[in-house]
Image (cartoon, grey):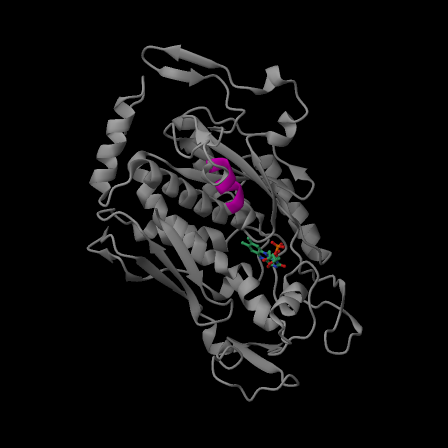
Amino acid sequence: MVDFKTAGESHGKGLMVIIDDIPAGIEVDVEKIDQMLYRRQGGYGRGGRMDIEADSVDIYSGIRGGRTLGSPVSFIIHNRDWENWKEVMSPKKSDITEKDSITLKRDDRKKEIAPHVTQPRPGHGDLAGILKYNLDDVRSILERASARETAARTAAGGFLKNFLSYFEIDIISHVLQIGSVQAPEVNVEGKEDFTALKDRVLESPVNCFDRESEQKMMELIDQAKKEGDTLGGKIEIQTTPLPVGLGSHTFWKERLDARLAAAMIGIPAVKGVEIGPAFRNAGRWGSEVHDEIFYEKEKGYFRKSNRAGGLEAGITNGEPLKISIAMKPLSTLYKPLRSVDIKTKKPFDAAVERSDTTAVPACGVVAEAMTAFILSQGLQKKFGGDHIEEVIRNYHNYQAGIPGEKSP
Ligand SMILES: Cc1cc2nc3c(=O)[nH]c(=O)nc-3n(C[C@H](O)[C@H](O)[C@H](O)COP(=O)(O)O)c2cc1C
């Protein structure tokens, strides 16, 4: 079953990802991967980092002549700011002392950075990290805890979207809420609705379907930026219909809902996951929640609603997947929060290194990537195969046994 590992620090040489156990013969559109990286970097409310990095994948292995070989696929995303950080992040023993401050030179701008950080920021892994790993430099934690690493996850997910497209599976995230601005729900019933949602999201600066809410979200982001504050929000991840039978009810780890929830919560700053409208369903009558089952000869089994979000007992039920996630407001504020210096034990106001006002739209792109990963695992587990044609044959064979199901 496909899996991946990432390595790399925020200001290191670059990020790398190795994707293992992927069928041979998959046609790879590298544009698809770079487009995901581009979308992860964008969104209204992002900070200075996005001006420096223009992410793209440098393919190291596993793809030849535009198709996968079946061997590990690996990418490197180079950190374009490395030149400025190579002293601070050098793997060699350093002469830099904690008293030194380094001047970063970028274009005409100059910026002082602390190579040795003793001031943990609230809402980050800084303090828990140094205590756990017995380190005296917060930078040794924050460099890996930084959400920069999600670029590598996004590359993996962008790559796996190529695999999913053989099964006509597509995924899009859209922003339902930023701070107090809530957009109306989007009802996606068929292919056309999905395409309309995707087209609109791709042109929206905040990945929001509704234009009026988009405007209000941008105004709120401007206000937050002016006040030195940050914003979180809610994102929905929506897919095209999935084949029945991915995941399993037999064991908690095999449940696709559990795997998706873990993948979502694993994204930095994501603190809640909902399968379908789970929290609203919690306050409703059962008769208002469950999706009734119908059958027609042509269509096979179907439902007229999808309040389960496409999953029952951890198994895909043939409907589109619909999950949403809650992202907390970002921890690094220009309006500083109080903390304590680990060396002096004296209080200080946590300063900003470089930060976004909100990263809700970008977080949605990472969630798409992680959804692509979990669905790819589900497909592989169900259909196996060392070559894409074998996977497709297995898939057709299975679909043929399900009334009304048509293979792409
Ligand atoms: C795409 C993305 C971008 C982020 N950018 C920032 C940022 O600029 N500033 C910040 O304080 N946190 C940012 N975060 C969130 C932090 O990485 C995260 O809150 C922190 O590492 C602590 O982890 P936790 O919130 O999961 O507990 C971002 C998260 C994502 C997904």
In what quadrant of the picture does the C terminus appear? Answer: top left
Q: Which residues are magenta?
A: 256-262
Q: Residue 394, position in %: x, y? A: 24, 33
**Is 390 placed above or below 140 here?**
above
Q: Nearer the viewer, residue 266 or 151?
A: 266
| Corner quadrant of residue 393 | top left
Q: Residue 347, position in %: x, y? A: 80, 71
- Left or right: where does residue 389 sit relative to residue 50? left
Residue drawn at point x = 45 percent, y = 32 percent = 250
Q: Residue furthest front?
A: 250
Would you say residue 372 sits in the magenta stretch? Answer: no
Residue drawn at point x = 47 percent, y = 34 percent = 197
Would you say residue 261 sits in the magenta stretch? Answer: yes
Q: Residue 272, position in %: x, y? A: 61, 42
- Left or right: where does residue 232 sit relative to residue 361? right
**Is 1 placed above or below 14 here?**
above
Q: Is residue 36 visible?
A: yes
- Left or right: where does residue 259 sit relative to residue 142? left
Q: Is residue 48 visible?
A: no
Residue drawn at point x = 24 percent, y = 52 percent = 70
Q: How many marks?
A: 0
Q: Residue furthest right?
A: 346
